[in-house]
Image (cartoon, rainbow, N blue to C red):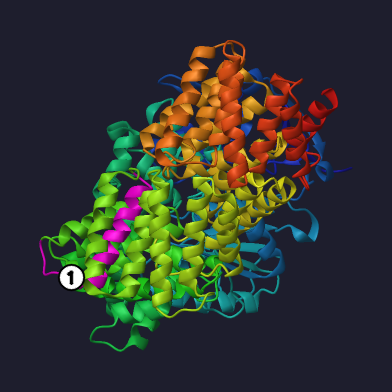
Amino acid sequence: MKPVSRAALFGPFRLSLTSKQLLKDGVSVPMGGRALELLVALVEKAGEVLSKQELLASAWPDLFVEEANLRVQMTALRRVLGDGQDGRHYIANIARRGYSFIADVTFTDIAERDAAAPPVVRQNLPLNLTPVLGRDAAVVAIRQELNRHRFVSVVGPGGVGKTTVALDAARSLLGQEGTAGPDAVILVELAPISDPALVENTIASAIGMTLETGPIQLAEKLPLERGVLILDNCEQVVGTVADLAEKLLNANPELRLLVTSREPLRAKGEHVFRLPGLQVPPRDPDGAGIDALAFPAVRLFVQRTAATLGNYEPTPEELAVIVGICRRLDGLPLAIELAAGRVDAFGVKGLAQRLDDLFRLLVAGRRTALPRHQTLLATLSWSYDHLAPGERTTLCRLAIFAGHFSLDAASKVAAIEEPSWEIIENLTSLVSKSLIAADFSQAVPRYRLLEITRAYALEKLRQGGGFDRLSRRHALHVKELVAAAEQEWPRARPAEWLTTYAGQLDNVRAALDWSFGPKGDHEIGVAITISSAALWFQLSLVNECRAHFERAVISLREGPPLDAAREISLLTGLGTALIYTTGPGPEAEEPLRAASRIAHRTGNIELQLRTGWALWLVEFCSGRYGISLDTARDFAALARTAGDGAGAADLVIANRLAGISLLFLGRAEEARTALEAAIEGGGAANVIVRMQYDQQLSGRAFHSANLYLLGLQDRASALATRNVVDAQAHGHATTLALSLVDSGCPVAFYCGETAALAERLELLADVSGRHAFGPWRAWSRCYGGSLHLLSGNISQAAEDLAAGIEALDRTRWPIRRAMFLSHYAQALGALGLGREALASVDGAIAFCRASGEGWILPELLRIRAKIVAQERPEEAMDDLDEAWRLAQRTGLRSWALRTATAAARLQPQAPRFATRLGEAVAAFKEGHAKPDYRAALQMMERI
């Protein structure tokens, strides 16, 4: 006769009262021993009320414990059972009496063989009261490591969640069957142990209590077959734990060790798993509309805030602030939980504003947490107090770096009295102890302090009186760094250059703040400002660049005068940044004119070239195309005076500037000659150009637009397409935006390429949405209206063009305003608003006549003729005659073809217009599939 076991059945559960094992739908449910004891006690007396004292005695016999422990275990037990879900209730809290198991229970006897499957895993893991967020991959990776290796250490900074992840990985092992599954999982909590002499007894006691075997000798083989031993929080006793780990593994061939520590044990057979912070949204996502709540750091903040407030759903604006908070806290779960716990006092935005005072702000943690985990200050103080004196000094000095730094940078800045090798040795030790993060993804390893660690160490540095001394050393290092970046830029590949220097922005900002601060050095700050211009422009951070240059220029009034070269660099950098932020107005031109006067006084050709380029830029961007051409020619003359050959970088710039000015003046053939010379000269960057972008791509973009005007529409379209592809590959927002607005969008519009225009407009909207840069957003809105016009959505076209032109006027950039006014006039005309349409096109014509913007004038006259044709046909023909003459004189063959087609349509019987149309069609050697040519052929067939 088979032995039988007593079991209780309720809902989907089967509880073995003999072996004390819970199954749900036949699958073992992992849970702690205390909770199981409580469940057995409640089920055995189902329907009765058990007092709290009775329950405490059943789960903690012969021990005095607080009632709070009972409440915690009952909460966890209800969570395991799913109490309250799907209408099922199992445990009731009877006020002032105790607890009762209220579900229907059936008691039965089952065969011991049936009751024994699956085998019991002896374990003492605590129940998980809250779900673990964003750690699925880490849990899987740790479990896989344990299956491959017998000894795995989870290492990371305090508050990163090492214990939580390790315990979750251990719980996942409980479900493994056969030889892969453990027969015991034992947690040993070493956090309270600071005396190495107590470590062995603590481990032995935890094993003996879990296995219920009595005293254990670690030097002997343990009474288990495939056990997993978790040694939690070992950092304060690493040496002792390392020795014991090796002994345990040698004596127990099937034993597996899972260790958590802020630093590796460096024991034989150890495999280290570095646990990072929770994932946060990237700083500059490639696409708009990223789901911040898909990132676990943000979800954790929102969930903990909801727990604090009772209910919480962040607005989109608050969500953006939360992302910044989580990023600032490096995704550390402890820091995020503490921060979320203060939302009730400050609100989300108020919390973000106070993050600079991290430690006074984040002082209230969970009372049940370890003392060193209750506050950020306690967590870091514990780590700091356990460092050697040299390590403390190095940590505080390296905190002066606001971003990444290299070994070389660390030794230059932090090595003062001691040799550099000592700083490097301390640095490697701090990396091992998870106080400094290392990044080996690039050719040169990079290091950084987590934000909360840095804030703590900086406070220690200030308290020790070394902040200003280290700030000066750091600023001098940054000065050398950005000077090297400036020198390398003209010869470097943009992507490689950015990989090297983009990560230094925070260091540059910190050095500038100190340099222009009350105890700083303005001369160092000016030097950093000048050399960092290329970096700001390459990253399209022009608003920030302007602010730095404005501060540096103001500092000139307070200190000794600068030499001419540096003063010119400051003034041209400021003027250029102002053009792309506030617009090409007098405030941008003033510093550029001042720089030009200084350059001419020195007689230095290089300085005159630098200021000449800047003057051309402000003149061109403000719509003074004729004056800008004169400046471009002066630039070319200066470049030749310098003795450079025709292919020199300065003459390449001169040809490009002249070509662009000639294009806007409508002198297409001359523009073609100059632009082709610029393109053939190569695309090397030049230090003269402070607004660094791919100059060859810029030249090609204007060349593409010019080819369209010349009637070479197939070549124009192909080049515009290639430009956009190359600009995307370049990875620089300014280069891509300029390629789109200068040729990608206008060429697609005039060639009737609706799909291409829609695709490019999407790119432009993305770039302009992420970079508030000059008129980009206004142009994007205008081109949106142009797309609707091309697609026949006239009402939306008029709405978008009106809004876009209004926004463009606010930027004070007149470039392309006439073109968009012509599109707006066409939309208004199609809506039957003839008077408004005429006012729009007349405004564009007046501007073009005043500024000399000739490239679009024939097309404006053609559009005007169409608007007035019905009421004033003779006036319309006069407009078309003028448009024809202008187009023929300047080689604008695409406009000539459109004008000739329009004239023939208005007077199909007039022989001279038929002749004119024939001449225009004959002049077209390509573009025969484009709308302009097809419309002309259809008109010829009619007449």
Query: Whole-percent x and y of residue 301?
Result: 44, 40
Identify the main secondary structure in magenta: helix
Closer to us: 66 or 519: 519
Q: Amino acid type of disc 1?
A: Leu
- Image: 164 above or below 821: below
Residue holding disc 1: 562
Is 566 part of what is drawn in magenta?
Answer: yes
Does 932 sit above or below residue 587? above
Residue located at (41% from left, 45% from top): 324
Is 412 displayed left or right of 217 in the figure?
left
> Magenta span covers which residues?
558-581
Front residue of 557 and 105 = 557
Q: Is residue 575 left or right of residue 446?
A: left
Q: x, y (%) of residue 656?
A: 51, 60
Crowding at mark 1 (Cα within 10 Å: few <14, some 14-19, many 20+): few
Q: Is residue 59 visible?
A: yes
Quadrant of the rendering where the N terminus is positioned = top right
Q: Position of residue 330 (x, y in %)?
A: 43, 54
Left or right placement of residue 136 versus residue 687 in this view: right
